[in-house]
Amino acid sequence: MNNLIIKNAAQLVTCSGFAARAGADMADPGTINDGALLIDDGLISAVGRTDEVLAGITEQDSLVIDASGKAALPGFVDSHTHFIFGGYREEEFCLRLSGTGYMEIMARGGGIASTVAATRKASLSELVDSGRARLDSMLSFGVTTVEGKSGYGLDHDTEIRQLEAMKILDREHPVDIAGTFLGAHALPVEYKGKSDAFLDFLMAKVLPEVAKKELAEFCDIFCEKNVFSLSQSRRFLRKAKELGLKLKLHADEIVQLGGAELAAELEAVSADHLLNASDHGIEQMAQAGVVATLLPITAFSLKEDYARAREMIDKNVAVALATDLNPGSCFSGSVPLLFALATLSMGLTPEEAVCAMTINGAAALDRADSVGSLDVGKKGDAIILEFPSYRFLPYHLGVNIVEKVIKDGKLVFDKTQGGRLA
Ligand code: NIG
Ligand code: FE
């Protein structure tokens, strides 16, 4: 069967649009009561009220899902993760619980460096296997598109291996993956004290290959005090742009360096973290149309103050939310936790949070033309909740209420049938 019909949905949440929703445009995701959705050969072919959509349609050749009493939404887009890695850092988590800072652990040679050591030892098939399990978990939360970064190799072979693992998973797993080259994530031990030389190496020996073989769509850098400076980030990202990669930045996470301003200057697709973005940076992002990707679970896990989401939206920035799943600062891909923190701790409304996880997540991956909303022509990526309204996403605190996930018009996850379907 190549067609799928969702009918009688108590609420069809469309998040309609083909570009980022900025500021006040996030206030209403758009809902249709008693809604229906038609998916034909993987693409959405009709959206509307059930009686209108089903008029003249034969249901015989389609998988029909009756969503009475339930809400249907676009699949979530988790636009910032580091889900390909080796090893874990539970000891470091305990150190942080007892007061040691994240950057302090990094300065002592732990943190990212410890995951780099473990990832360098991991084979391609080990990275694929652990990545696959993490994708299964994301899918169960309703995520149908995810971004994943390299950055735990910091050498030619491991960086390429991480990106290849994502290419393999993109082909074999229902979740779509947008790959990001984050070779400039930290300084590897072999380049201690030589950060410019390390960036030269990446720009000469890794970045051109990544671009030529199309191993990644985006290039990112950890622009942070004691990691890569603003001018180093500018130099590196300019080169990446020249080679045809789209840009992202880990910006103003721990220290206010002007990362938000740099993202605007370079017309990056998104600037991420932004816990310490300046007023000026926020204005510049609004003007340049840079998506602000906020990562509340990371702030929570690092016990840092949250990014100023409310002010950003009020200043007409397009805000996206993402998990930042990684083995260090934020070992969580939990969408329910994300909704809880975004609404209860950052002041987003449930409506804004829904837009931030759908259409704006898609825009943060430059994919607002193909995913992130229930619009005719887009991929048939949708989720059905166990409850009649999207408002249950934050309200049912910390609980996964996703019942079904449809990817490219195929039912791939169904809690009522035991979870992931073959
Ligand atoms: O987005 N801030 C830098 N990078 C990651 C954390 C990486 C790690 O701790 O392994 C982040 O928080
Ligand atoms: Fe990150």
Image: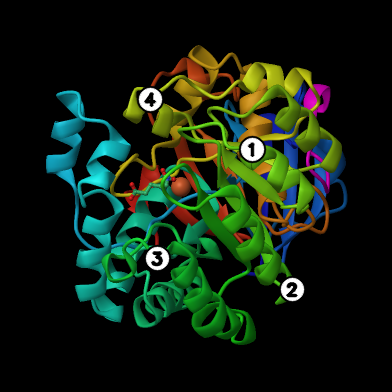
Foreground mark, 2 or 3, reads: 3
Q: Earlier in the sequence, mark 2 or mark 4?
A: 2
Q: Which residue is mark 3?
A: 194
Q: How is the image coloured?
A: rainbow
Q: Is residue 20 in the magenta section?
A: yes
Q: Earlier in the sequence, mark 3 or mark 4?
A: 3
Q: Position of residue 2 (x, y in %)?
A: 66, 69
Question: Is the C-beta of the residue carrying label 4 under 8 Å from the nearest atom of ligand 1?
Answer: no
Foreground mark, 3 or 4, reads: 3
**Mark 3–mark 1 contact, CB under 8 Å?**
no
Q: Which mark is residue 83?
A: none
Tell me which segment is drawn in magenta. Answer: 16-25
Give me the C-alpha separation between circle 1 and circle 2: 22 Å
Q: Earlier in the sequence, mark 4 or mark 1?
A: 1
Q: Which residue is mark 2?
A: 242
Q: Which residue is mark 4?
A: 300
Quarter holding residue 246: bottom right
Which residue is painted at 62% across and 22% down in the image? 309
Foreground mark, 2 or 4, reads: 2
Helix, strand or loop at label 4? It is: helix
